[in-house]
Image: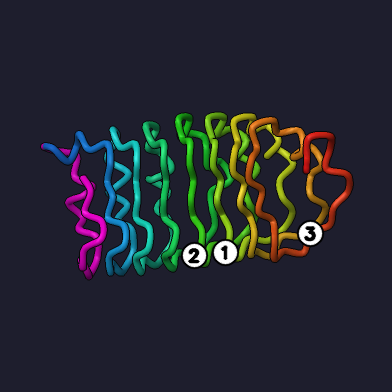
Amino acid sequence: MDLGYNNFSGEIPMWFGFNSGFISKLETLSVRNNLLQGGIPKEIGNLENLKDLILFENQLTGSIPLSIFNISSLELLGLSGNQLTGSLPVDICRRLGRIKRISLVSNHLSGYIPSGLSNCTELSELSLAYNNFSGNIPPEIINLERLELLSLGGNNLQGVIPREIGNLQKLKVLYLQFNRLSVTNLGATAT
């Protein structure tokens, strides 16, 4: 279901999370570029066939419901361009075995980037730029062998960039600008 680029306002209807009728079979829920406000209903986590959750560019607030991280069919989590707060769960990928793209750019998320992201073995895009993440880049990120895009710029990250990032063979795009990072030799494949 694609309801993007409209003028929907108010809160996301809770019926999006009811697991009945055609809603229960939804594979895509896109309500991008609207004027939605309020929190993301935890009931969206009931959509067990959902592959793409796209809520880009709204005015959503509050934390990301933990129930979303239990949708084992999810391949794309797109929540960029909102006002979401809170942190990501440590075991973020415990149930997200199929996730390929996580895009949470331009929110107000904070805390550490969870080392559990290394369990998202299908991940090709990780975009967490322009939030308030702090701490180090987790060294476990080098286990994401399919990673093509890593965007962590515009946070409060510090420490040394893990040099093994240079060994990620499929990595094409690396954005780490506007942090407090330092660098050693990034490895043979970095340019």
Residue at the outermost front position: 191
**What's the mark number on residue 107?**
2
What residue is pinned by disc 1?
A: 131
**What's the mark number on residue 115?**
none
Q: Earlier in the sequence, mark 2 or mark 3?
A: 2
**Which picture quadrant has residue 55?**
bottom left
Give x and y (percent) for residue 119. 58, 32
Q: Residues within 10 Å of mark 1 (few under 14, many from 20)?
A: many
Work out whether residue 3 or residue 63 is closer to the camera in this orientation and state it. Answer: 3
Element at badge 2?
A: loop
Q: In this view, does 145 lie to the left or right of 43?
A: right
Whether 189 is drawn above or below 160: the answer is: above
Residue at 29% x, 47% y: name it.
44
Residue type, numbered disc 3: Leu
Q: Quadrant of the N terminus?
A: top left
Q: In which quarter of the image is the C terminus?
A: top right
Work out whether residue 148 or residue 160 is closer to the camera in this orientation and state it. Answer: 148
What residue is pinned by disc 3?
A: 181
Whether 122 is drawn above or below 174: the answer is: above
Work out whether residue 138 or residue 34 is closer to the camera in this orientation and state it. Answer: 34
Q: Which of marks 3 and 1 is nearer the N terminus?
A: 1
Q: Residues within 10 Å of mark 2 (few under 14, many from 20)?
A: many
Q: Distance between the residues labelled 2 and 3?
A: 21 Å
- The magenta segment is 1-21
Q: Is the magenta stretch mostly helix, strand or loop?
A: loop
Give x and y (percent) for residue 29. 27, 46
Residue type, numbered disc 2: Asn
Q: How far apart are marks 3 and 1 (CA)?
A: 16 Å
